[in-house]
Image: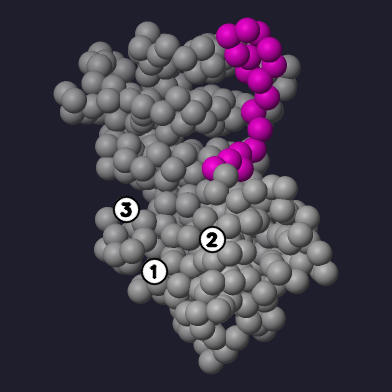
Amino acid sequence: MQVRELAVESVSGFTTDPQWLPLFKKNDCKVVKDLAEHLVDTPVIAHHALRSLINLSHDEDIIAVLNTPGFLYHIVLMIVLPKSVLADLYCMLLNNMTKNPSVAVQLVPEESILPPKPPIEPSKDANKNPLTSSHQIRTQHLDNLVEVFLRGSTKVYNSSATFAFLAGVFANVSSTPLGARFFLRPSTVDEKTPRLSKLLPVLDHRNHTDVIRRDGVASAVKNCCFAVEVHRELLDDSGNGVDVLPMILLPLMGNEDYSDEDMGGMPDELQLLEDDKTREPDIKIRRILLETLLLLATTRHGRDVMRRRKVYPIMKTLHLAERDEVVLAHIENLVNLLMRDEGAEEEGAVVSHENRVTDGKKKELTIEEMDDDDNE
């Protein structure tokens, strides 16, 4: 055991230096396969092996070796087990791997349209080589990741894990069309709440101080807004839709007072905020939130909803307080869309991409789908 431990620890030291990467690709990535097999060794050996795979998982060739149904099942299992001391490290590995779309879509199997199956449980061959396991990812597995993520900020589910890097996984999965649709469907946990609705409260920095969690969720929300055909569902405030607008706007608001006329049309969640209410402190997240609003404003229906729910006065107030040039440019573009003369334009028409967002230097800044960019 000591020999194996020293060997794996020594190998781990080489994974931090890019110059040694070619060595790990020799003989059909044999060393990588050996490291994967050591994930079911003793806790210390598994820890070294896992850190090595995290360091190597930015490489496409190595991801291709790890991209097997059995290995993904093993990762999910080791994240959701309540006493898994390596859960956060497995979250980092899954975050890195799902930046590859071919891995991300495997977390959203086609059976996601079918009724839920029993919860994930350890299997008889849980101690066998994860790469060659016969297990498959099921729909409820991604739902389980959502549930443990929501409980992670207080460590009530696993005292050794916060699951923060799962936010990056959700961003990566939602960057695929299949993944974006998946997050708009009801969770298999309660069969009525859309998965995206479960994630929206994480955008409030007052209750969720971890910027990694907020950044990933903001990116996932943005990714779900690229398909204009789902904008009605995303903006539906009747209780039957996702209603993303209040939770996108809340982080962009401070403690300013609004007139009774403006307050009367705002969502309830945005009224009578605390005197010490502050805006989202992270510039990148503010940019993502504004880009999301711009996506939702590409249709006549989206703009009409924003006008009715008094987005304009919120943007006007934000513009006075904002200092970031990119955010300011986004605000100005959004206001231009909301103030435009609609004329006889059909309700389903989409604003031309000639209306691109520009930064302060007037370069084109295209609104692109978001992958988590935390390199672990």
Q: Is residue 16 magenta?
A: no
- Residue matched to label 3: 153
3D distance between C-alphas at marks 1 and 3: 16 Å
Please state which of the two labelled residues, at mark 2 or mark 3, is closer to the viewer.
2
Mark 2 or mark 1, whichever is nearer to me: 2
Q: Which mark is residue 194?
A: none
Identify which amino acid the numbered label 1 is placed on.
Val
What is the spatial separation of the Cα atoms under label 2 and label 3, in whole angstroms? Answer: 23 Å
Quadrant assignment, res 356: top right
Say whether disc 2 or disc 3 marks the residue closer to the N-terminus: 2
Q: State the extent of the magenta-drawn residues as a range.
A: 357-374
- Label 2 crowd (10 A; few <14 / some 14-19 / many >=20): many
Please name the colour scheme applied to the rendered image: one colour
Name the residue tied to disc 2. 51
Would residue 275 be found to the left or right of residue 157 on screen?
left
* Percent of width and height locating residue 158: 32, 66
